[in-house]
Image (spheres, grey):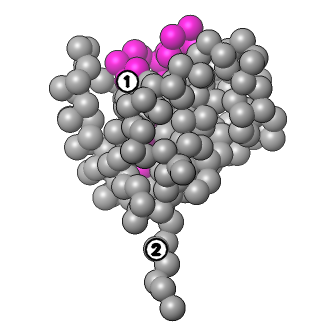
């Protein structure tokens, strides 16, 4: 009988969750991707309230991954490559604290790795990284229509012009980490 590796969780926010979700759905070793909200003060956040910037939450994705296939370091390397971690509270035309660059860590070990990867990525970007590294807070899964959004709506304007280029960048940069 083979020994199974326990999955781990990563929680990342870098703009609209549709972008981050679409990329990680294609990453080898990632077994579950869910869009949701974290880091705010409202006990029942909705998409409308989060988008208005009144709840303090960030749009995030919660990933479950097999660390024997993909490391947390590799997940963060992908994350810091597919979004701009140098723009405070924005990604492109998406502006507000709900679109901030943030890594919510689930353990002290993840905190150490996140800060190490940020130091490595600081050498890649021309401006200082503004990504927050915070301990995880209460997770709120986003409404059902946000889950797997890009796959369901690839021709929708935002998906075609904002999400698709991030997916292409992932495929081109990390072709060795694509699901078979």
- Name the spot of residue 132 as percent of width and height, x first: 38, 33
On residue 68, which mark appears?
Answer: none
- Name the spot of residue 133 as percent of width and height, x first: 37, 39
153 versus 91 height, above or below: below
Rendered residue at 45%/25% (across/down): 169
Q: Residue at the front extreme?
A: 180
Q: Nearer the viewer, residue 113 or 179?
A: 179
Local SS, label 1: loop
- Name the spot of residue 131 as percent of width and height, x first: 37, 29
Q: Which residue is mark 1?
A: 85
Q: Report crowding for label 1: few under 14, some 14 to 19, many 20 or more residues within 10 A (C-alpha).
A: many
* The residue stretch that appears in magenta: 84-105
98 part of magenta stretch: yes
Q: Residue at the top extreme?
A: 93
| For marks 1 and 2 on the same chain, the one whose residue lies earlier in the sequence | 2
Rendered residue at 48%/45% (across/down): 178
Residue 87 quadrant: top left
- Name the spot of residue 105 as percent of width and height, x first: 42, 50
Is residue 104 shown left or right of residue 111? right
64 part of magenta stretch: no
Residue 77 quadrant: top left
Tell me if residue 162 can be seen: yes
Q: Residue at the bottom extreme?
A: 1
Residue 86 quadrant: top left
54 versus 180 height, above or below: above
The reply to whether dot 1 and dot 2 touch (C-beta < 8 Å) is no
Tell me if residue 46 can be seen: no
128 versus 81 height, above or below: above
Q: Nearer the viewer, mark 1 or mark 2?
A: 2
Local SS, label 2: loop
On residue 5, which mark appears?
Answer: 2
Q: Report crowding for label 2: few under 14, some 14 to 19, many 20 or more residues within 10 A (C-alpha).
A: few
């Amino acid at each position: 009988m083979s020994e199974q590796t326990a999955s781990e969780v990563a929680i990342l926010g870098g703009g609209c969750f549709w972008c981050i979700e679409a990329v990680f759905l294609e990453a080898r070793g990632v077994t579950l991707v869910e869009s949701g909200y974290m880091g705010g003060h409202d006990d029942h956040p909705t998409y409308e309230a989060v988008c208005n910037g009144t709840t303090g939450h960030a749009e995030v994705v919660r990933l479950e991954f097999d660390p024997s296939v993909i490391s947390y370091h590799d997940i963060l390397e992908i994350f810091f490559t597919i979004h701009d971690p140098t723009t405070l509270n924005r990604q492109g035309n998406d502006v507000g604290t709900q679109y901030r660059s943030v890594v919510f860590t689930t353990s002290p070990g993840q905190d150490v790795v996140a800060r190490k990867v940020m130091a490595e990525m600081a050498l890649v970007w021309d401006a200082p990284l503004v990504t927050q590294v915070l301990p995880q807070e209460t997770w709120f899964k986003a409404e059902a229509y946000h889950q797997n959004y890009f796959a369901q709506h690839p021709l929708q304007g935002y998906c075609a012009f904002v999400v698709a280029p991030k997916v292409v960048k992932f495929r081109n940069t990390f072709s060795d980490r694509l699901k078979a």
